[in-house]
């Protein structure tokens, strides 16, 4: 047979040839280095053009009128919504977790007492240290997960959210509004049974929490490692010889001041993390590398001291159980999440320390970051 | 009458993605897709559903929005670039925006038929469906696609290269 032309090769690779033709091309290519090279090139073009075209999925909605104005509106609305949630969270009653389905979040909607937003959202987080919020990526089955995960901050999107039962938001804020970047920062309490399966496809790993050891004394913050991945920076701070916390800095953020605390054991969390990972293998391009393993101190002897949890798992946890840290609970994995007012970045501080301790560390981090910004603006 | 609800469930996602890639505007893409399904309602029967839907959507874009299209596409591009410039500290965003802008330019550089064939193929249409939707002979689809892919990749790479050179010059 003659050398197949480029169109025939593409047809063959696209399975568009008849069985006989395909067999002819196949046997020819097997014995012809020149055509084998052409086939390899064609495969490259097919893969590359697919990849290029996916970038087109990152488009804004409603190009006319311009989007930036809407973005600002969203931020204001989110700030108000977040404040409402923090206040609401502050008046919640403890709910036990145990991996069980939480009581309906609707029940706690009654406890939204006011929505006056203090001067800055950061203040809210600082004062509402026991505030617990469930946070869940928005379940949104109608969106194809694939194209969704490709959407980035460049596209401001407004889309209907799944559960109408989301607590304060449905009463107060703009419940259906989220920005492309904000899917990791949607302050929305969703029923666990909805949130758990629905979030899986959206599972862009956000942060991982690793904490080793127990609280001991105050030491200067020491950066153990800094890791940059798509859209985030992760810094591991050594708090004491045996304690580390992880600060995750999201480059993009739209949600202000949300505090999440969790009191479940790390083991429980770990199991959930594993389950979530099984269900939803994360897309390689959006998944940051696993956090740098923190060496467990020899004397800790804690089987559960290393808990790698993708955000999906964290959020599952949070969505699954809105709860406050019990007064006597032992330090479990706790997470603080806030937005740095100077940069607008979402920061997530995570560590197996009491929440008060995390608040302290957070203040120190803020001071250090402010100082660093002064030095190199 | 075709079962439009089923058609919608089966093909809406692909159709919207196809149109979004084609138009550079998701809202607009959804409007066109909806109009396409409305048209399907008026049919007594549709033989090859997917080819029919993509053909009608393509024609809707072509016929009804020909004038509007360039303007909006241009604005979409401008908006992307502006966003890229505004969010300078956010490297990821900037990079994504640049990639999207380059992809848009590369796709726009294709001949209309090549572009449509490629976008349809990406949504899973087979050669016969593409041929039917675009009124090509089935035998020419492979050639069309191979040309479209090669040109897309080559012009994207050229854009990438000139961007890298610009950055290098800016850095030095």
Image (cartoon, helix red, strand yellow):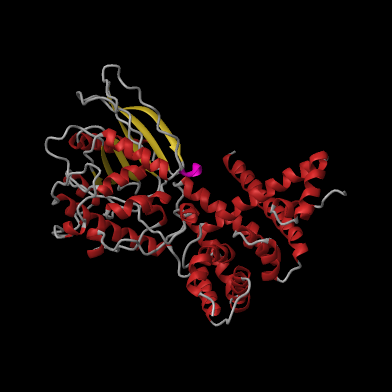
Question: Which residue is situated farthest in the front direction here?
Answer: A20
Q: Position of residue A220 (x, y in %)?
A: 26, 26
Residue A292, placed above or below residue A348:
above
Residue A221, placed above or below residue B9:
above
Along the line of sight, the residue nearer the viewer: A320 or A220: A320
**Which image quarter holds the N terminus of chain B?**
bottom right
Q: Residue at x 47, y 72 (%)?
A: B5
Give yes or no for residue A285 being in the magenta stretch: yes
| Residue A207 visible to an observer of this rendering | no
Which segment did they paint magenta? A282-286
Q: Residue at x 76, y 51 (%)?
A: A22
**Which image quarter holds the C terminus of chain B?**
top right
Give yes or no for residue B21 being in the magenta stretch: no
Q: Residue at x 47, y 58 (%)?
A: A144
Q: Quadrant of residue A175?
A: bottom left
Q: Is residue B125 left or right of residue A91?
A: right
Magenta part, dominant SS: helix
Q: Quadrant of residue A302?
A: top left
Q: Is residue B87 left or right of residue B18?
A: left
């Amino acid at each position: 047979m003659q050398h197949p032309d480029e169109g025939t090769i593409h047809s063959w690779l696209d399975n568009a040839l008849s069985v006989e033709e395909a067999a002819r091309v196949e046997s020819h290519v097997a014995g012809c280095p020149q055509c084998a090279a052409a086939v390899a090139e064609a495969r490259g073009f097919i893969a590359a053009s697919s990849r290029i075209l996916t970038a087109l999925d990152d488009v804004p909605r409603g190009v006319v009128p311009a989007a930036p104005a809407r973005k600002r509106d969203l931020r204001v609305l989110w700030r108000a919504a977040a404040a409402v949630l923090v206040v609401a969270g502050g008046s919640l009653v403890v709910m036990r977790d145990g991996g069980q389905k939480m009581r309906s979040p609707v029940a706690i909607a009654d406890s939204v007492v006011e929505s006056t937003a203090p001067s800055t959202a950061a203040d809210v987080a600082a004062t509402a240290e026991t505030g617990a919020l469930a946070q869940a990526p928005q379940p949104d089955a109608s969106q194809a997960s694939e194209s969704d995960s490709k959407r980035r901050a460049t596209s401001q999107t407004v889309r209907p959210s799944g559960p109408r039962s989301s607590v304060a938001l449905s009463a107060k804020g703009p419940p259906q509004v989220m920005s492309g970047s904000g899917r990791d920062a949607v302050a929305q309490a969703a029923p666990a049974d909805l949130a758990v399966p629905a979030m899986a496809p959206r599972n862009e790993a956000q942060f991982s929490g690793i904490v080793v050891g127990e609280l001991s004394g105050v030491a200067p913050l020491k950066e153990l490692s800094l890791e940059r991945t798509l859209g985030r920076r992760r810094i591991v701070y050594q708090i004491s010889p045996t304690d580390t916390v992880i600060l995750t800095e999201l480059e993009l953020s739209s949600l202000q001041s949300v505090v999440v605390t969790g009191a479940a054991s790390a083991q429980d969390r770990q199991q959930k993390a594993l389950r979530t990972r099984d269900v939803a293998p994360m897309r390689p391009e959006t998944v940051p590398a696993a956090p740098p393993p923190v060496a467990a101190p020899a004397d800790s002897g804690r089987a559960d001291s290393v808990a790698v949890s993708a955000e999906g798992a964290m959020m599952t946890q949070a969505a699954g159980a809105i709860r406050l840290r019990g007064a006597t609970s032992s330090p479990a994995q706790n997470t603080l999440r806030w937005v740095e007012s100077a940069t607008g970045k979402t920061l997530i501080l995570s560590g197996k320390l009491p929440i008060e301790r995390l608040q302290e560390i957070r203040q120190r981090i803020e001071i250090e970051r402010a100082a660093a910004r002064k030095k190199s603006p | 009458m075709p079962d439009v609800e089923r058609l919608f469930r089966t093909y809406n996602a692909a159709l919207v993605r196809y149109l979004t890639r084609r138009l550079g505007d998701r809202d607009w893409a959804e409007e066109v897709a909806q109009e396409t399904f409305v048209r399907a309602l008026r049919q007594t029967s549709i033989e090859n559903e997917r080819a029919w839907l993509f053909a009608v959507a393509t024609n809707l874009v072509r016929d009804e929005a020909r004038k509007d299209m360039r303007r909006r596409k241009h604005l979409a591009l401008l908006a992307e670039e502006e966003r890229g410039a505004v969010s300078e500290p956010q490297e990821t965003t900037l990079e994504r925006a640049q990639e999207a802008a380059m992809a848009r330019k590369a796709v726009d550089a294709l001949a209309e038929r090549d572009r449509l064939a490629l976008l349809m193929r990406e949504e899973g249409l087979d050669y016969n469906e593409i041929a039917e939707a675009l009124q090509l002979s089935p035998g020419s689809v492979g050639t069309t696609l191979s040309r479209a892919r090669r040109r897309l990749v080559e012009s994207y790479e050229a854009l990438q290269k000139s961007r890298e050179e610009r950055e290098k010059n800016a850095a030095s």
